[in-house]
């Protein structure tokens, strides 16, 4: 069965989509010459892509033809984790994997001893969760709760507003007061920037609320260096002033919300002085900010997922998201707040993934507790131990928290691990089988977005590199070998795209595969005057914006907006904070994309060695000088980094940008050796930035642990 049904273009320009986990989902033009990709380019006609790609994705061709790219299946020959493999044929690999998985399925512990593990290597609907879900659902494997990125904020927003919607760059340019709240726009959402620039040229004021003076904060009119995890306190302090001074839009609150009187009362307790004590900001500045925010229209808040990586992340997002309800900013074009626009895309996920095939009572494992799941007898949640792990679209041995525990699990000799990948990543090193997967240039897909309203088709532009196969095809072939004969396993990738588009939602009307093939990308049929909560009919239980969300009470959470201190802060855990006085933030490094581009030579060089940013006062008390080799540690583990002494970070905060490959990092350890498997208040989300550490000088040499380049695993022949 061939995954493509249309011939490849030998020389010309092919329309594609950037597959990465970013709000921008760019329309990407791939230039092909004699069957080889030579360049990728942002589509100049796309209203959000606007003709440019980011630093990382500009290197997509370099990554695709990287000398270390996997060309054949690889079988482990050395001990687990050493990274020694030998090439094998697809038949050998799939026969062995099917046999082992069938044995486990039929064995003492049953199919739930098999755990899929995947996340955002691609956000494609087809190469993400389609055939893979059908496969795992049909065999009755354990379910994976995909919480590593966005679940706290998604639940926080969801209980308040239902679907996630908000102004996109096309509306945001109309805003005149803009708060970039816990988001590093120039790094992680760069295609919003041109809209912000246009707004600014028309007189808008741009503010950043971030513990770090990021490259984005440095470009704003003002930077408010808030303490990590204190955002809800700031939002409540702002509401205090807005209500007190009669700057609220009471009509909007009456018409469209429930619980606003209780919120007004709650906000009454949050004087600017109290908010200042928690946020580390100046009380007078909070007063003034409240006035500026409430009286300048339209006002727009861009929050993103960074700020919810603390214990109180769900509540923080929920609290901030209510500011435009209090002021009525939602009424204006470009006014409101955006966490995500994913609610605009109502695709046929059920048809793609067949959740109806999941056997009743199947357990769910939280992906951020992979270490726990692999090292405890009942997978940490009750039920059988995990005996097989099948990884695709993810690199948990780099991106998951508490890597010491993850590695301990992956080293288990009785764990059967299959990793579908482009490279021998940190995770692939521990595999029994590594299977070569295609990249976005080599397979079909269709993409929604979470920062705009365009649906984008990805057409393959080149033939698969080496013997690589799309994820879908690997699962199809495995299904056949394991004796699964449902006709759904015969659907081709284009069939899956057509199925994804089968939707009765009014915004999906008229969007077909043929049109996408012709036009490349299509805006969903949302109103052009896009003000999603101007006259809201949210799909919440009350049909209103839920300032008061009673369903939270049943899970032990305050049903009203509130402030939840970070788990590892001095407020919540003074004993720990005394030992580990620095709160370590590890947001994305500008030239990296989670862990995906960490081994691409140009970007590896651009990122340089791991850095550890410290405020001059923190450096001074530890005798640390700029450029020193530092060791950063807590009870969970340690890693090394080069000191950058700078007042870009607050005292009490340390920063190490990520995500790195352990095998390319000093000592084979990364920041995720220190992060915790704890969860957020809502959604079971990751708390990467709720991480108390200490730092000391560590004179000595860098030690790298790179898997040798040649002779160990088979690579693509040099071109
Ligand atoms: N270049 C690049 N772009 C990316 C990615 C990447 O790895 N590299 N990753 C993509 C993915 S998967 C995601 S989810 C997004 C993430 O992108 P964002 O949602 O923007 O999240 P982060 O970069 O994690 O954090 C944003 C900012 O929040 C700040 N921050 C941390 N804690 C707090 C807090 O408590 N309060 C406030 N106010 N600010 C805080 C951080 O210092 C950081 O500057 O980016 C996507 N885009
Ligand atoms: N300390 C710290 N840790 C973090 C974060 C942080 O800010 N700080 N951010 C977190 C966030 S927001 C996220 S979203 C996660 C991301 O974590 P992951 O979802 O694991 O993302 P990546 O690290 O990009 O790894 C994706 C892998 O998928 C592979 N891949 C790409 N396309 C395909 C394909 O078509 N088929 C197959 N089989 N493989 C493919 C790539 O080669 C890559 O190795 O990391 C989290 N980890
Ligand atoms: Mo993410």
Image (cartoon, rainbow, N blue to C red):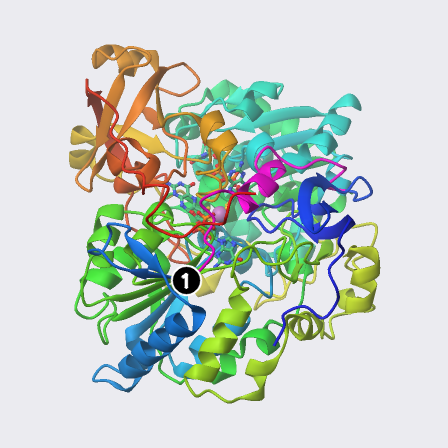
Secondary structure state at the residue bearing disc 1:
loop
Say whether residue 247 is visible: no
Q: Closer to the camera, 496 or 413? A: 413
Left or right relative to 175: residue 637:
left
Q: Residue at x 76, y 56 (%)?
A: 9
Q: Closer to the camera, 695 or 102? A: 102
Tag count in the figure?
1
Q: Closer to the camera, 288 or 648? A: 648
Instruction: Residue 340 in the image: state x and y as whole percent.
Output: 60, 50
Q: Is residue 31 above or below residue 548?
A: above
Instruction: Residue 231 in the image: state x and y as whole percent.
Output: 46, 36
Instruction: Residue 116 in the image: state x and y as whole percent.
Output: 39, 67
Q: Is residue 197 above or below residue 573?
A: above
Left or right relative to 522: residue 54:
left
Say whether residue 243 is visible: yes
Quadrant, the N terminus: bottom right
Label 1 environment density (alpha carbons within 10 Å; few <14, some 14–19, many ≥20): many
Q: Residue at x 74, y 24 (%)?
A: 200
Residue of label 1:
73
Instruction: Residue 10 in the image: state x and y as whole percent.
Output: 75, 53
Type of secondary structure dominating the magenta stretch? loop
The quarter of the picture where residue 522 lies is bottom right
Q: Residue at x 25, y 22 (%)?
A: 630
Residue 325 among those drawn in magenta: no
Q: Is residue 397 above or below residue 384?
A: above
Q: Is residue 40 above or below residue 381?
A: above
Range shown magenta? 48-72
Q: Closer to the camera, 86 or 316? A: 86
Residue 66 among those drawn in magenta: yes
Quadrant, the C terminus: top right
């Amino acid at each position: 069965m061939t995954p493509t049904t249309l011939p490849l273009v030998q020389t010309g320009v092919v329309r594609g989509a950037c597959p990465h986990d970013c709000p921008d989902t760019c329309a990407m033009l791939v230039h092909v010459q004699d069957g080889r990709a030579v360049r990728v380019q942002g589509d100049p006609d796309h209203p959000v892509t606007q003709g440019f790609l980011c630093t990382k994705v500009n290197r997509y061709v370099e990554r695709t033809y990287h000398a270390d790219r996997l060309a054949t299946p690889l079988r482990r020959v050395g001990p687990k984790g050493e990274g020694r493999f030998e090439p094998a044929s697809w038949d050998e690999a799939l026969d062995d994997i099917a046999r082992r998985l069938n044995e486990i399925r039929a064995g003492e512990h049953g199919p739930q001893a098999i755990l899929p593990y995947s996340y955002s290597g691609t956000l494609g609907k087809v190469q993400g969760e389609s055939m893979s879900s059908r496969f795992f659902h049909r065999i009755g494997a354990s379910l994976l709760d995909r919480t590593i990125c966005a679940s706290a904020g998604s639940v926080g927003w969801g209980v308040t507003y239902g679907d996630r919607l908000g102004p996109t760059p096309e509306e945001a340019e109309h805003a005149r007061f803009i708060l970039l709240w816990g988001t590093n726009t120039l790094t992680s959402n760069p295609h919003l920037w041109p809209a912000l620039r246009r707004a600014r040229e028309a007189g808008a004021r741009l503010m950043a609320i971030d513990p770090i003076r990021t490259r984005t904060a440095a470009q704003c009119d003002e930077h408010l260096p808030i303490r990590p995890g204190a955002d809800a306190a700031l939002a409540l302090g702002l509401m205090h002033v807005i209500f007190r001074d009669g700057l609220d839009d009471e009509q909007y609150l009456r018409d469209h919300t429930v619980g606003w009187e209780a919120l007004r009362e709650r906000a009454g307790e949050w004087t600017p002085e109290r908010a200042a004590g928690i946020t580390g900001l100046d009380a007078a500045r909070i007063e003034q900010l409240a006035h500026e925010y409430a009286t300048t229209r339209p006002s727009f808040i861009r929050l993103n997922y960074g700020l919810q990586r603390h214990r109180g992340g769900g509540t923080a997002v929920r609290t901030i998201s209510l500011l435009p309800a209090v002021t009525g900013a939602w009424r204006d074009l470009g006014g409101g707040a955006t966490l995500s626009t994913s609610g605009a895309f109502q695709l046929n996920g059920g048809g793609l993934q067949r959740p109806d095939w999941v056997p009743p009572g199947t357990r769910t494992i939280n992906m951020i507790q992979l270490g726990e799941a692999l090292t405890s007898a009942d997978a940490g949640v009750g039920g059988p131990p995990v005996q097989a792990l099948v990884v695709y679209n993810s690199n948990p041995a780099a991106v998951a928290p508490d890597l010491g525990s993850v590695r301990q699990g992956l080293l288990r000799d009785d764990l059967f691990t299959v990793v579908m990948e482009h490279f021998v990543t940190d995770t692939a090193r521990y595999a029994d089988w590594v299977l070569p997967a295609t990249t976005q240039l080599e397979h079909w897909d269709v993409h929604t977005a979470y920062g705009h309203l365009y649906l984008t088709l990805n057409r393959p532009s080149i033939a698969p590199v080496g013997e690589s196969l799309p994820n879908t095809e690997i699962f199809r072939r495995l299904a056949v070998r394991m004796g699964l004969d449902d006709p759904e396993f015969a659907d081709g990738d284009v069939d899956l795209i057509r199925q994804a588009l089968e939707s009765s939602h009014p915004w999906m009307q008229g969007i077909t595969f043929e049109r996408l093939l012709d036009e490349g990308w299509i805006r969903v049929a949302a109103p052009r005057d896009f003000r999603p909560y101007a006259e809201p009919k949210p799909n919440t239980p009350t049909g209103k914006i839920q300032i008061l969300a009673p369903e939270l009470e049943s899970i032990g959470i305050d049903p009203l907006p509130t402030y939840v201190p970070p788990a590892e802060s001095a407020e919540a855990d003074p004993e720990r904070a005394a030992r580990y006085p620095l709160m370590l933030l590890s947001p994305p490094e500008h030239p990296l994309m989670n862990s995906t581009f960490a081994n691409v030579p140009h970007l590896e060089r651009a990122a340089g060695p791991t850095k550890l940013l410290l405020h001059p006062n923190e450096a001074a008390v530890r005798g640390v000088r700029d450029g020193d080799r530092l060791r950063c540690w807590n009870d969970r583990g340690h890693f090394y980094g080069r000191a950058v002494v700078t007042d870009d970070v607050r005292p009490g905060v340390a920063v190490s940008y990520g995500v790195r490959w352990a095998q390319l990092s000093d000592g084979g350890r990364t920041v995720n050796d220190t992060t915790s498997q704890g969860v957020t208040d809502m959604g079971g989300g990751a708390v990467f930035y709720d991480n108390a550490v200490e730092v000391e000088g560590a004179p000595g040499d860098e030690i790298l642990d790179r898997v040798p380049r040649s002779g160990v695993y088979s690579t693509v022949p040099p071109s």
